[in-house]
Amino acid sequence: MVMVVKWDGRTEEFDPTKIVRTLTRMGAPQGVAEEIAEDIADQIEEGMTTKEVYEMAVDSLEDHKEVVEFRRDLRDGLARIGSGFRFEEYVRLILQEYGYKVSGNVVIQGACVAHEVDSIAERDGETVYVEMKHHSVLARYTPFEVTLSAKAKWDDLEAGCKKGLNDCSFDRVLIVTNTRLTKHAQRYAECVGIEHFGWNTPRGRGLETFIEKKKLYPVTILRTITDDERDVLYVNGILTLQQLVKETPKDTGLSEDRVKALIEETHRVFTCCQAES
């Protein structure tokens, strides 16, 4: 047990999980943050200040600068998707890649009223009601009202199913967002059995983890792409880098030279730091 000195002079036991939390907030992947925390745990000495420990962590993060910048590009790219409608399309592509049969924007009769459901995902005999929330401002979290509404909708749909008004009995509800739920919303979701995926939420297996595992990066992760170019690609059915590299330039709606430049940038994304992420 190693004791460190806090800013006010009090001492506390060194806790490596605080290093992990700090570094993931700074953009480090979970694996990188845990590796750095382990290294610091081996180096730390009795009586060091928490400021010194923090500086050690930040200095260590410099060795992983490329992967941190890559993660920031992904987070910014998700915010730049442009609209909730496009985010819903993008999440459906992710679900499909993981083996789900997905339908979107379905209107289902509940016991009291009809409800529009963002997506229904089916796999291995399980049916999931999926609610998606996109935020173009990264500091904006999904509020409590969204989880409250999802629970109320779920209850009414289940009651409608029992009355024979629909045949959609949902095994679970999933909220997907590109930021996070507020703490209040998260507590309520966990209490009533609603799952949620957001940025690094749940910790270490958030939305970015599912994206990186299948390399399902949105075209907006590219630093040089403009909003107009993004919209042209969308019109031509291209939301991800995987789709971009498979299309001929004439099918993208952009010039051949511009597509060539974007694909060169795409190769950087595909090869950047995958072992560390």
Image: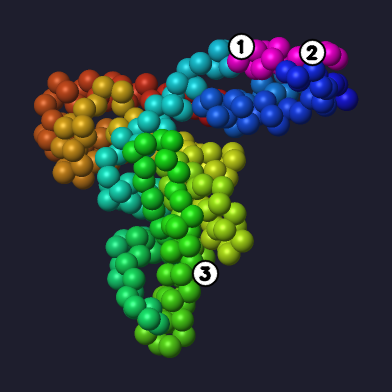
Residue 60 visible at all: no
Q: Amino acid at mark 3?
A: Asp
Evaluate if marks 2 and 1 touch, with contact meaning CB atoms under 8 Å apart: no
Residue occupied by mark 2: 48
Work out how far the residue at label 3 is from the one at label 1, CA to CA, in angstroms. Answer: 46 Å
Q: Is residue 241 above or below residue 158?
A: above
- Badge 2 local density, few (<14 within 10 Å), some, or many (20+)? some
Q: Is residue 47 magenta?
A: yes
Q: What residue is rendered at 30% in x and 48% in y?
A: 84
- Number of labels in the image equals 3
Q: Is residue 249 left or right of residue 17?
A: left
Q: Which of the labelled discs sits on residue 171, or is there none? A: 3
Q: Is residue 163 left or right of residue 33?
A: left
Q: Amino acid at mark 1?
A: Asp
Tell me where the magenta segment starts and ends, as one range.
42-59
Work out how far the residue at label 2 is from the one at label 1, CA to CA, in angstroms. Answer: 16 Å
Residue occupied by mark 1: 59
